[in-house]
Image: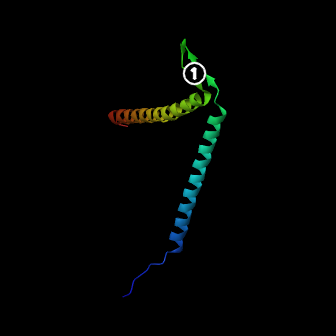
Amino acid sequence: MKTSMKRPTPDSTRSNLMRNLKRALAAVFVLLLAAVVLFFVLENQQTVSLVLFGWAAPAMPVAVLVLAALVIGLAVGPLLGAYGVQRSKRKIRASARQAALNGN
């Protein structure tokens, strides 16, 4: 009984090596980022009270406020970007429709 074992080609071996290297680098980056966030949280334990237009938020550590602002910014930024893209597409479609009506 003969089994046919395919030998990996140099290209597939190289691509597997690059894929594993990318995964390892991504893992190292995520671990470093987690370490920086942990260090930031541990170093900013002072409690502050945020006051905005007469409304006072409960006292909480500075790190919580900064990280909450970061998360909100990360959520709002792409939403505004998507809105801008949709608005641009709408303007382009309107211009194309107007050009078609004018016979250009």
**What percent of the width, then of the height, locates residue 6?**
44, 78
Classify 53 as above or below 88. Answer: above
Q: Nearer the viewer, residue 102 or 7?
A: 7
**What percent of the width, then of the height, locates residue 34?**
59, 44
Label 1 packing within 10 angstroms: few (<14), some (14-19), many (20+): few
> Dot 1: what SS?
loop
Residue shown at the point (32%, 33%) measured from the top left: 101
Q: Nearer the viewer, residue 41 or 22?
A: 41
- Judging from the image, the colouring scheme is rainbow
**What percent of the width, then of the height, locates residue 35?**
62, 44
Residue shown at the point (50%, 75%) measured from the top left: 9
Residue type marked 1:
Ala
Mark 1, residue position:
59
- In the drawing, does residue 98 fall left or right of residue 52? left
Question: Which residue is outermost to the left?
Answer: 101
Residue shown at the point (63%, 30%) measured from the top left: 45
Residue shown at the point (57%, 21%) measured from the top left: 59
Classify 10 as above or below 38. Answer: below
